[in-house]
Image: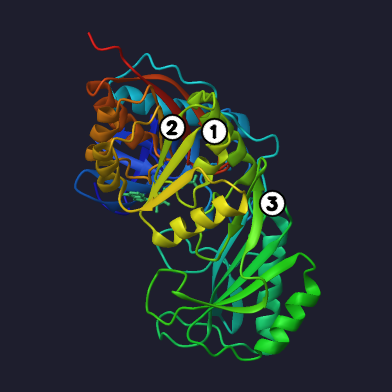
Amino acid sequence: MQPGQMIELEVTGQAHDGAGVGKYEGFAVFVPLTVPGETVRVRIESVKKNYARGKLLELVQAHPDRIEPVCPVYEACGGCQSQHLSYEAQLKHKRQQVADHFKRIGGMDDVLIHPVLGMSDPWRYRNKAQVPFGRRQGKVVAGFYSPGSHNIIDMESCVIQHELNDAAIRFVKAQAEELGIPIYNEQKHAGVLRHVMVRIGSNTGEMMIVLVTNGEYLPKRKELVKRLVAAFPELTSLVQNINSKRTNVILGPKNKRLWGKEVIHDTIGDVKFAISPHSFYQVNTSQTKVLYDQVLRYAALTGNETVIDAYCGIGTIALYLAKHAKQVYGVEIVPEAIRDAKANARLNGITHAHFAVGAAEEVMPKWLEEGIKPDVVIVDPPRKGCDPVLLKTVADMRPERLVYVSCNSATLARDAKLLLELGYRVQEVQPVDMFPQTGHVECCTLLVREPRS
Ligand code: SAH
């Protein structure tokens, strides 16, 4: 197979990024924007040792669930992967993907997987936008990078983004143009304005704007601040973040408050959280509540339990569960996140939460040695899943219940297989759609301890 080659392909499966995949003369070909069941004409773009990637040219046989994408830059942008499917079909496909992973990777074909909990309005759900700024043909542009490149797709509006985030980015773009603020040039590592990040507390309406600049100097700073404050009554915190490194990492280490507060607040249920520019916070607030309520149900707390929340971020799950438990522990590798977690415990008057900084696979064995005996353990690892040492330690702690929250059902299924060997059986899986229009699926899984014979 060679780049440039045209082939006809039957799409039979789906990759983790939402792309369709089919076999051509036994060779796997990945084609974005296609659906299992379709026959498509494809141009091969790149060929690797074990697979190729192609571009969709023509639908020979289209899937009945296929619809016209809403966003005009859907194909070029790459931020969404599923807009060509009706929402109902997206949910169906996500559930199927989870089932496939449990079967193929976990070796389990009888797992109870509930229908995906979707949103009644699956648009404009993102509470956070962060977009690179650039200049093209003399004009200021802002938007996502097109897939696999650093070409900015200029975007007027993003249909999965909160309207206010959209409006703030459009406004900064217009002001940067009008005030002549120098825009960062990645190749030359010159210019000033690199990124704009906007966050909205969906339940409080508080808005934070972060201007990421290459160095301390921000020309026309006073005027820009004045205009932003006048334009957005929701604005609560306006911050300059300084990032003078040649790097893909968006935020630099230093924040400078330009106006208002240093943090914004949001609530999930009746728990309040302070969010600073560097804090990790789930991007879909209403579905986060759906997810955490599911965690709460699976944890089945009566008020007497000790709970461990591993990979706890800013402590959201631990604090959400705290009032239903006797004692909660959280562990997380990022020190700033643990600082936020402790502050958030104080903010909510929660005194029976204990947070520790460190790798879960290192801290948990210490807790085991100290004799901490959890009744319930929650894990919510990043995409790569849990370290085997962590899973072994959880099993040695012998909690009755293990609730595994995962943003990658492939590593979830892999870990579930190991957990089965360690005496924990998957009882049920509740997928939650945290990221409508994209290929990502979040799962909340209940595992229970098998009685030892
Ligand atoms: N439960 C939180 C955060 C989940 S994201 C929430 O719902 O908001 C996963 C978290 O795991 C991130 O905060 C990341 O920093 C952390 N992390 C990554 N590797 C880790 C490790 N080895 N030990 C502990 N935490 C880790």
Does residue 56 lie above or below 441 as drawn? below
| Quadrant location, the C terminus | top left
Q: Position of residue 20 (x, y in %)?
A: 41, 38
Q: In the rendered structure, which disc, 1 or 3, sits on the residue that comes first in sequence?
A: 3
Q: Residue furthest left?
A: 49
Residue at 45% x, 78% y is 243
Q: Secondary structure at mark 1?
A: strand
Q: CA distance from mark 2 to mark 1?
A: 26 Å
Q: Residue at point 51% right, 41% down?
A: 317
Tag shown at residue 384: none
| Residue at point 44%, 62% (across, down) | 336
Q: Position of residue 161 (x, y in %)?
A: 64, 54
Residue 202's disc is 3
- To which residue does mark 1 refer? 432
Q: Amino acid at mark 3?
A: Ser
| Residue tagged 2 | 306
Check the image and tell me how it is coloured.
rainbow
Badge count: 3
Indicate the amino acid at tag 1. Answer: Val
Q: Is residue 186 left or right of residue 106?
A: right
Badge 1 vs badge 3, beta-carbon distance below 8 Å = no
Is 190 drawn above or below residue 148 in the view shown?
Answer: below
| 43 horizontally vs 122: left or right | left
Give the label, 1 or 3, closer to the camera: 3
